[in-house]
């Protein structure tokens, strides 16, 4: 069992060989065993999938940017799945990440709340609460998690 309170700040980047899958509109749009996860105090892991392992046409650049003090400038994408389902700003990427995060350059992180299903090693994840963060909660992760009611000041 992993407690998010044992994760470091600044965050740590780890490679992941577990199968990661994302389904939207009933269609598998991303699948890899070459992912990464970012672990940061109080947050469930955020998983990054190499862009080569995301289906062609599943990502459309969308407006807006944000800045992470650790990873740098993020670029956002609308995510398109089967039956034309489109989730505005449902994914993001660091095209030119800051030092220490080169391994996720161009990789895609999906907000699990907007997808039909996100999976780690066949387990359906629970989205991180709050809608702002994109953490993937599995049964081996314990909180409390940033994003839950009353936690925005953490």
Image (spheres, rainbow, N blue to C red):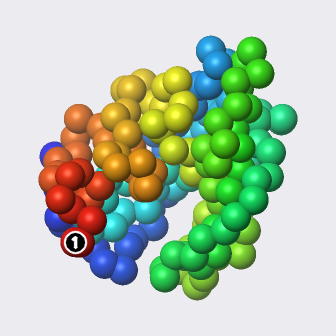
Q: Is residue 35 left or right of residue 3?
A: right
As displayed, is residue 53 above or below residue 98? above
Residue 112 visible in this rendered orientation of the protein: yes
Residue annotated with mark 1 = 154
Quadrant housing residue 85: top right
Q: Quadrant of the C terminus?
A: bottom left
Q: Is residue 99 left or right of residue 148?
A: right
| Residue displayed at 57% across by 76% down | 67
How far across and how far down the image is residue 13, in percent?
A: 45, 67
| Residue displayed at 76% across by 35% down | 58
How far across and how far down the image is residue 56, in percent?
A: 83, 35
Asked which secondary structure carries label 1, the reply is loop
Residue 19 visible in this rendered orientation of the protein: no
Specify few, some or many for label 1: CA neighbours under 10 Å numbering under 14, 14-19, or 20 or more.
Answer: few
Instruction: From the viewer's side, name the closer residue of 15 and 86.
Output: 86
Which residue is situated farthest in the front direction here?
A: 150
Instruction: From the viewer's side, name the closer residue of 10 and 122.
Output: 10
User: How many marks do you count on the picture?
Assistant: 1
How far across and how far down the image is residue 105, in percent?
A: 68, 66
Which residue is situated farthest in the right direction here?
A: 57
How far across and how far down the image is residue 43, in percent?
A: 30, 59
| Residue displayed at 52% across by 76% down | 68
As displayed, is residue 128 above or below residue 19? below
Quadrant housing residue 100: bottom right
């Amino acid at each position: 069992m992993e407690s998010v309170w044992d994760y470091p700040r600044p965050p740590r980047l780890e490679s992941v060989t577990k199968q990661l899958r994302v389904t939207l509109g009933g269609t598998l749009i991303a699948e890899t065993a070459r992912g990464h996860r970012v672990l940061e105090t109080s947050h469930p892991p955020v998983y990054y999938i190499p862009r080569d392992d995301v289906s062609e046409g599943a990502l459309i650049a969308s407006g807006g940017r944000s800045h992470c003090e650790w990873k740098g400038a993020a670029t956002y994408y609308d995510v398109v799945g089967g039956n034309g389902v489109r989730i505005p700003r449902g994914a993001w990427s660091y095209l030119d990440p800051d030092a220490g995060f080169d391994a996720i350059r161009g990789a895609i992180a999906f907000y699990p709340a907007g997808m039909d299903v996100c999976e780690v090693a066949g387990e359906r994840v629970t989205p991180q609460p709050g809608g702002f963060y994109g953490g993937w909660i599995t049964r081996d992760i314990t909180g409390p998690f940033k994003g839950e009611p009353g936690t925005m000041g953490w």
